[in-house]
Amino acid sequence: MKIAKTISAARAFVRDARRPIVLVPTMGALHQGHSALIRRARRIAGEKGSVVVSIFVNPAQFGPKEDFSSYPRPIEADESVCREAGADLVFRPEAAAMYAADASAFVDESRLSMGLCGASRPGHFRGVCTVVAKLFLIVQPDAAVFGAKDWQQLAIIRRMVRDLDFPVKIIVHPTVREADGLAISSRNAYLTPDERAAAPGLYAALRGAATRNTPAAIVREAERRIACIPGARLDYVRLVDSAALEPVRRLDHGTTLAAAIFLGRTRLIDNLQIPARS
Ligand code: PAF
């Protein structure tokens, strides 16, 4: 496995790499969820293709009061995860290499980014789209793998790829969960023992609510169940069209029940895909 710390080193790898090139963009602090994405990338690339993992804590997607400086950066452990899961290249640039101090060009998705997490994290998805577009331009992947846990991110990246004609196939990998249902996330490490014990309540609430028969009843039931999670503060619960992320009035096509809560200072997100019902 090679390591590239500069854009020119990554470009040199790409120039000689065998295709397909499959990219797994990450911010590091890699866990079993990321390993699953890298392994999936390996299967798609096959023995002959190339798997690139980017590790970059992207300052452009953190708000001023968010955890950019405290975000974990266990780079040696991350490189071992990449090696074991079958990566060929780890691209881990410094922030100064990715953004000029006076950078003033960004990629902005202006519709799907407005609601859900975008409403409470202004500018977040502009940062995500900008860095993912830059990674696509540097690594020139044939495919890129994203986790379903960040469903809004996935939908926005699909929209960006469609609207800007990136020749990249977007692969979605199912959310990897702990045995008790909690979606695995780097930020779970921030939870106190009491918060960790309460955290699986989020997914349980979404699952319980999805048994209701109308969109309004599903959202109401999710809110009611989340209100019963000890210490939880609701950010949002929405039932939306899975691609356009618009609120739905019917359940006759695939929908996404998405929620965010705070447990103490930690913000947790999760979602459930609800198949069409007649
Ligand atoms: O999902 C993440 O870890 C990040 O948002 C991503 C896609 C790597 C962009 O920084």
Image (tube, grey):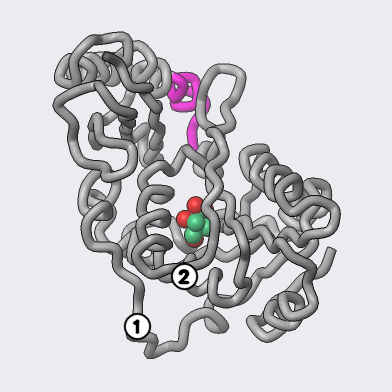
Compared to residue 16, the image places residue 194 above or below, namely above
Q: Residue 219 or 262: which is nearer the viewer?
A: 219
Query: What secondary structure prevails in the magenta region?
Result: helix
Compared to residue 206, the image places residue 81 above or below, namely below
Disc 1, SS: loop
Q: Which quadrant: the C terminus?
A: top left
Please provide the residue range marked out in magenta: 190-200
| Crowding at mark 1 (Cα within 10 Å: few <14, some 14-19, many 20+) | few
Q: In which quarter of the image is residue 97?
A: bottom right
Residue 180 location (% of width, % of height):
55, 17
Query: Label 2 CB, ligand 1: below 8 Å?
Result: no
Compared to residue 247, the image places residue 21 above or below, namely below
* Mark 2, residue position: 133
Residue sitting at x 46%, y 87%: 100
Residue sitting at x 41%, y 70%: 130
Compared to residue 241, the image places residue 210 above or below, namely above
Query: Label 1 CB, ligand 1: below 8 Å?
Result: no
Say the numbered circle drawn on residue 105: 1
Q: Residue 132 or 100: which is nearer the viewer?
A: 132
In the drawing, does residue 251 fall left or right of residue 190? left
Confirm or deny contact between disc 1 and disc 2 (CB under 8 A).
no
Residue 185 location (% of width, % of height):
53, 40
